[in-house]
Image (cartoon, helix red, strand yellow):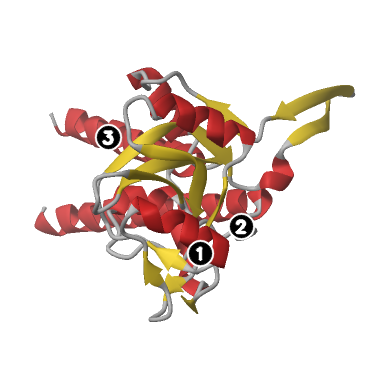
Amino acid sequence: MKKESFSLCIILRNTICATLVFLVMLSAPTGWVYDLWAGEGTEQGQRPSVDVQRLQQQEDIETCFLSNTPVTVNNRELAACPLARLRDSEQAGVHMHHNSGVKRSVSVSEYIYADYPIPPLQRFVQGFVGGYYNRYHLLKLEDGSWLCVYFDDYLALTGADNYPTGYVRYTTTEERRMLNQMAEDYDVDPVYVLDMYRYGKVSWMMDILLRLAVCVAAAVIVWSVKKAFKMQFSHRR
């Protein structure tokens, strides 16, 4: 009986470790770590200072764009968009790799698309590659209209009270195509996007190393907890 319980603990431990590895390496965003030292101010991606205005209604969007005003938004209802963009844009393009003496080319797309409305499977896939791609969202403004926003995915997961400082810019071709689809269901202007992402904060090579470090730390914690329980069980005997 004790042997069966011990085997069950080992299976449970291995399952937890494997789950943590998959989550950290492929989907759990680590952008919050880089934002710890982003600082406060009017630069894009920083925590908003008192000089950063709140964008509250659609008629203010063009004014903020023309004046290049640093703005942020209140924490309101979000809708996921069927488009995600590569976190490290330098990773996009064709890369050559040597595998067992064979030269292979790997193409990395800057954007990944999903059908609209987003099917559950594609929503899961977009979230699962969240370690490398960052999703767009629509955010509901106080006047009932919607605005396309782009920030680090972890903010959508945590429901941030204060979104980062951002600047309104024109949409790219891919962004505008996506917003034209969503404009059938949402009162959103497909011409503008509020970009609050701090570009350059994530190098894909450094991000992979950070994720490995997180996995090692998690494994050490699990091992330490297991050892503590084992010692406690031995003392009771």
Q: Earlier in the sequence, mark 3 or mark 2?
A: 3
Residue beneath disc 1: 45
Disc 1, SS? loop
- The kind of residue tagged 3 is Leu
Q: Nearer the viewer, residue 236 or 34?
A: 34
Q: Nearer the viewer, residue 198 or 66?
A: 66
Q: Is residue 142 left or right of residue 22?
A: left
Q: Is residue 64 left or right of residue 234?
A: right
Residue beneath disc 2: 199
Location of residue 70 with respect to 177 vertically, above or below: below
Q: Is residue 92 left or right of residue 104?
A: left
Q: Which x, y percent locates residue 94?
A: 80, 31
Disc 2, SS? loop
Residue beneath disc 3: 12
Location of the N terminus (image quadrant): top left
Q: Classify residue 182 by image quadrant.
A: top left
- Are the residues flagged by discs 1 and 2 in contact, CB closer than 8 Å? yes
Which disc number belongs to residue 93?
A: none
Q: Which x, y percent locates residue 174?
A: 59, 32
Location of residue 29 with respect to 116 vertically, above or below: below
Q: Residue at x 74, y 27 (%)?
A: 107
- The kind of residue tagged 1 is Gly
Q: Earlier in the sequence, mark 1 or mark 2?
A: 1
- The kind of residue tagged 2 is Tyr
